[in-house]
C-alpha cells in the first residue's frame, strides 16, 4: 500500500516506512524552500523531502543543502526531522566508501552529543543507535561515554542504548562496556535507565546480568518499576532454560513477583510459569493471576487474552481450574457479551460434583438480578441475551450433573413470564428435565400450573401445553391442569352474542366495536318469515385481560390447536381412572373446544381450514374416548414425546466427542489416490464408508478391494490399470 517503488539502497538504510500521497516537488523548489524559507516552511518541506525519498525518489543531491541550512538549526522539530533524513539517506557511494559530506555530518553529531539541551542530546543518541557505518561511529565513542554520567535521566537512558547498539556491531570501540554498564546499573536510580543497562548486560554479558540479579534478587526487585521487573522476568525465563539445575531458585523469584501491583508484570509472570512448569502449584498460581487480571483490568482485549490462557490451562490441567470456579464467575459483572459467553463456556467445563451446586446457585442469583433490575440497570436487549446465556449454562450444568436439577427448576419456572427467547429456552429445558428426571414431575407440573395464566409468549404456551398433556398421570394432576387452563382462559363465553331487532340495529350500530353481523331467516309456528340479525363481538380487550384468553380471542389458532390436543391427552388419561371425576373433565374439555370453534366461526380473523379440521378431530376423539384406537393414540403420543427429548442433540454432552475429534497439528495426511502399489493402497484405505470393488489381477484370480465412497473413477481406474 505504499506509493511508488522503493530502491534497494533506501530499503537498506530505512528503518521506517511512511506513505506519501501528496504532490511531489522538484529539487529546485525544495532547495529554494530550505535555503530561504522560515522555520515552519523548512519543517513542511523536510517532511515532503523525507516522504519523497521513502517512496522511491532518491534525494541524495539535497544532502549538502540539508547540511548547510537545516542541520545547524536549534529548532527541536527541525532537528528531529533532520536526523530522520540522515537515517534514510545513502551515506556511502557506489563503491561503499563514506561520502565526503559525512565528515561535516559527523562533526555536527558530535557537537549535538555535547549540546547543553538534554532533548537534543537524547535525540542524537537515539540516532546513533541506527548508524551502521564504522567511520561515523569511531569519532563519537568518547561523547557517548560522557553521556553516561549526564545529570538528566533521559540522556542516560539513550546513552546506554547507544552504547549497546555500538557494542553489538563494533565491540572494539567499547572493549570494557560490560564492566562499565555493570557499575552503572549498580548505582543508577532511574528505573528506565536501569532497565536499559540490565538489557545490555542480558544481551551482551549474561554472566554479569546473572551476577547483578543475584545481588538484588531478595531486596530490590519487588519494589522496582514495571519495566525493570519485566526485563528481570525475561532474563529469569532464559536462565530457567539454560540452567535447569537452578530452575527452582529462579521460579521462586517469579513467584515473588506475582505480588507486583503492575498488571503487565503479573501477566508476564503467569505466562512464564505456565510455559516453564507443569507443577500444579505453579499452574494454580498462574491461573489465579489470569483470573485476577480478568476481574481487575479495564482493557477488553487483555481480558480476552486472559480467557485464552485459562482455556489453554483447562486443556492440560482441568482439575486445577475447578478450584477457581467461584472467582471466575465473579467476573461476569463485565457487560461485554462475548466475554460473558466465553466465561460461561469455561465455567461449564470447570464444574465438578463438588462445586456444581455453588455454581448453579450463583447463576440463579444472576438470573434473579436480571429479572429484578433488568429494566432499570441494563439495556433490555442486552439483559435478554445475558439471561439466555445463563439459562443455557444452567442447562449444560444440569446435563453434566443431574443432581442440581431440583435446585434450578423452581427459579427457571418463575422466569417463564418474561418475553424473549430465554423463556423458550427455559421451557425446552423443563421439557427435557420432566422426562429425564421423573422424580421432579409433580413439582414441575405444580409450578407450570401456577404460571400458565401469566405467560404471554405463544411459543412458550404451546410447549407448556404439550408438556402438561404428556406428563399428567393421576386424576389429581389432571384436575390441577384443567383448573389452571380454565383460570387462564377466563369465564365463558369467549365470544359475546346478542340478538338485535331491525328497529334497534341502526341505534346500536354506533356503540358496536369490532362486530360482525349474521342474518338468519326463520319460519315461525304461524308460518311467518322472520329475519334475525345476530351481532358477534369478541370480548373487549382491556389492560387487565388474561394473556392466554387474549391470544385465543385474537386469532392464534395454532395455540388453540395445541390447547385442544392437550385437552384430548388429559381426557384420555382421565378415562383410565375410576370415579365420576373423569366425566367432569370430559365435559369441561368439550366446552372449551366448543368455545374455540365459536371463536373461529364467529369472529375475525376466521379460523383456517387445517386448524378447524384438527380441532374438530379433537372433539370427535373426546366423544369416543373409550375406543381402543384412541387409547393407542394416547400411548403413541407419549412415546413420541419421550423419543423427541432423548434424540434432541442439544441434550448430549459433546465434550468427549470434541476431544476425540481433535487431530494433532503434525498428523500426516493420507491421499490414497497418489499411493504407489496396490498393497500399500489397500493397507492405507480407510475401512469405514467403503465399497467393495471387484478387480481382476494378472494371475486371473478375483480379489476385492475396499475403496472409500466418493473417491471417484480416477482411483478406481488407477487400480485397474495397475492390476489388470
Image: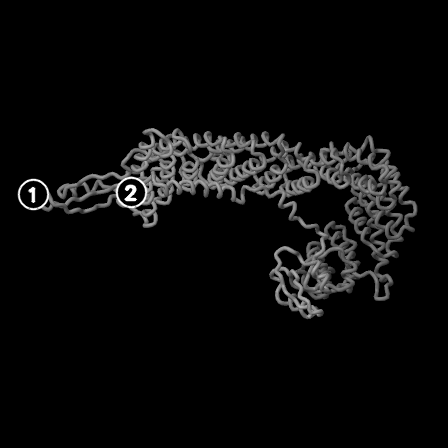
Q: Is residue 298 visible?
A: yes
In this view of the protein, which residue sits in the foreground, 107 or 163?
A: 163
Q: Residue 639: x, y in percent?
A: 46, 41
SS category of the residue bearing label 2: helix
Find residue 338 and report its horizontal and vertical position in percent.
Answer: 58, 43
Gap between marks 1 and 2 measured at Cα: 34 Å
User: In which quadrant will I find the C terminus?
Assistant: bottom right
| Quarter of the image where one finds residue 499 | top left
Residue 364's tag is none
20 w.r.t. 579: above or below: below
Neighbourhood count class around disc 1 (C-alpha, 10 Å): few under 14, some 14–19, many 20 upward: few
335 or 634, nearer to the observer: 634
Rendering coords of residue 313 (x, y %): 69, 40
Residue at 45%, 43% in the rendered image: 640
Q: Nearer the viewer, mark 1 or mark 2?
A: 1
536 lies left or right of 708: left
Is the C-beta separation of discs 1 and 2 under 8 Å?
Answer: no
Find disc 1 in the rendering and name its residue: 526
Q: Is residue 457 visible?
A: no
Q: Earlier in the sequence, mark 1 or mark 2?
A: 1
Q: Which residue is mark 2?
A: 599
Amino acid at each position: 500500500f505504499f506509493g511508488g517503488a522503493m530502491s534497494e539502497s533506501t530499503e537498506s538504510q530505512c528503518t521506517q516506512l511512511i506513505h506519501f500521497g501528496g504532490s511531489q516537488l522538484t529539487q529546485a523548489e525544495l532547495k529554494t524552500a530550505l535555503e530561504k524559507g522560515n522555520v515552519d516552511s523548512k519543517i513542511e518541506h523536510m517532511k515532503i523531502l523525507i516522504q519523497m525519498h521513502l517512496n522511491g525518489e532518491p534525494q541524495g543531491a539535497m544532502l549538502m543543502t540539508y547540511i548547510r541550512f537545516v542541520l545547524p538549526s536549534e529548532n527541536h522539530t527541525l532537528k528531529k526531522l533532520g536526523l530522520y533524513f540522515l537515517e534514510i539517506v545513502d551515506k556511502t557511494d557506489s563503491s561503499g566508501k563514506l561520502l565526503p559530506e559525512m565528515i561535516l555530518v559527523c562533526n555536527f553529531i558530535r557537537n549535538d552529543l555535547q549540546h547543553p539541551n538534554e532533548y537534543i542530546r537524547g535525540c542524537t543518541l537515539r540516532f546513533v543507535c541506527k548508524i551502521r557505518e564504522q567511520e561515523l561511529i569511531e569519532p563519537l565513542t568518547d561523547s557517548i561515554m560522557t553521556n553516561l554520567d549526564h545529570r538528566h535521566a533521559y540522556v542516560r537512558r539513550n546513552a546506554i542504548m547507544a552504547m549497546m547498539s555500538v557494542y553489538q556491531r563494533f565491540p572494539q570501540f567499547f572493549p570494557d562496556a560490560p564492566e562499565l554498564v555493570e557499575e552503572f546499573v549498580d548505582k543508577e536510580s532511574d528505573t528506565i535507565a536501569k532497565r536499559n543497562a540490565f538489557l545490555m548486560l542480558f544481551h551482551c554479558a549474561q554472566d554479569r546480568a546473572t551476577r547483578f540479579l543475584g545481588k538484588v534478587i531478595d531486596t530490590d526487585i519487588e519494589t522496582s518499576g514495571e519495566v525493570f521487573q519485566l526485563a528481570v522476568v525475561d532474563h529469569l525465563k532464559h536462565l530457567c532454560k539454560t540452567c535447569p539445575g537452578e530452575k527452582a531458585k529462579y521460579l521462586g523469584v517469579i513467584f515473588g513477583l506475582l505480588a507486583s501491583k503492575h498488571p503487565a508484570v503479573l501477566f508476564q509472570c503467569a505466562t512464564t510459569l505456565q510455559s516453564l512448569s507443569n507443577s500444579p502449584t505453579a499452574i494454580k498460581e498462574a491461573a489465579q493471576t489470569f483470573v485476577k487480571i480478568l476481574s481487575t483490568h479495564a482493557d477488553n482485549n487483555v481480558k480476552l487474552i486472559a480467557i485464552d490462557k485459562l482455556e489453554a490451562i483447562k486443556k492440560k490441567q482441568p482439575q486445577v481450574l475447578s478450584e477457581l470456579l467461584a472467582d471466575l464467575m465473579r467476573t461476569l459483572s463485565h457487560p461485554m457479551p462475548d466475554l460473558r459467553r466465553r466465561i460461561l463456556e469455561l465455567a461449564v467445563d470447570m464444574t465438578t460434583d463438588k462445586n456444581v451446586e455453588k455454581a448453579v446457585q450463583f447463576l440463579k442469583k444472576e438470573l434473579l438480578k436480571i429479572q429484578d433490575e433488568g429494566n432499570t440497570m441494563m439495556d433490555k436487549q442486552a439483559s435478554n441475551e445475558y439471561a439466555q446465556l445463563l439459562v443455557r449454562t444452567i442447562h449444560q450444568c444440569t446435563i453434566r450433573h443431574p443432581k442440581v436439577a431440583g435446585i434450578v427448576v423452581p427459579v427457571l419456572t418463575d422466569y417463564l413470564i418474561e418475553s424473549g427467547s430465554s423463556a423458550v429456552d427455559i421451557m425446552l429445558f423443563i421439557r427435557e428435565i420432566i422426562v429425564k428426571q421423573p422424580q421432579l414431575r409433580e413439582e414441575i407440573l405444580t409450578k407450570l400450573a401456577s404460571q400458565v395464566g401469566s405467560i404471554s409468549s405463544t411459543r412458550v404456551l404451546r410447549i407448556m401445553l404439550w408438556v402438561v398433556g404428556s406428563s399428567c398421570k393421576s386424576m389429581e394432576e389432571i384436575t390441577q391442569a384443567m383448573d389452571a387452563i380454565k383460570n387462564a382462559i377466563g369465564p365463558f363465553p369467549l365470544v359475546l352474542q346478542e340478538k338485535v331487532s331491525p328497529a334497534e340495529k341502526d341505534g346500536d350500530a354506533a356503540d358496536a366495536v369490532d362486530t360482525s353481523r349474521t342474518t338468519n331467516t326463520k319460519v315461525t309456528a304461524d308460518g311467518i318469515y322472520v329475519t334475525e340479525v345476530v351481532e358477534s363481538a369478541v370480548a373487549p380487550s382491556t389492560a387487565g385481560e388474561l394473556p392466554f384468553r387474549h391470544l385465543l380471542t385474537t386469532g392464534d389458532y395454532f395455540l388453540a390447536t395445541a390447547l385442544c390436543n392437550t385437552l384430548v391427552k388429559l381426557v384420555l388419561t382421565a378415562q383410565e381412572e375410576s370415579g365420576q371425576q373423569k366425566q367432569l373433565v370430559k365435559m369441561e374439555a368439550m366446552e372449551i373446544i366448543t368455545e374455540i370453534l365459536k371463536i373461529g366461526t364467529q369472529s375475525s380473523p376466521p379460523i383456517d381450514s387445517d386448524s378447524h379440521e384438527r380441532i374438530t378431530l379433537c372433539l370427535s376423539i373426546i366423544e369416543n374416548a373409550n375406543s381402543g384406537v384412541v387409547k393407542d393414540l394416547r400411548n403413541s403420543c407419549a412415546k413420541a414425546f419421550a423419543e423427541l427429548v432423548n434424540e434432541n442433540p442439544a441434550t448430549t454432552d459433546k465434550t468427549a466427542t470434541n476431544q476425540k475429534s481433535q487431530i494433532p497439528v503434525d498428523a500426516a495426511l493420507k491421499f490414497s489416490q497418489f499411493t504407489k502399489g496396490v498393497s500399500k493402497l489397500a493397507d492405507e484405505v480407510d475401512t469405514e464408508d467403503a465399497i467393495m470393488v471387484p478387480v481382476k489381477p494378472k494371475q486371473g484370480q478375483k480379489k476385492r478391494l475396499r475403496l472409500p465412497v466418493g473417491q471417484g473413477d480416477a482411483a478406481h481406474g488407477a487400480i485397474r490399470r495397475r492390476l489388470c
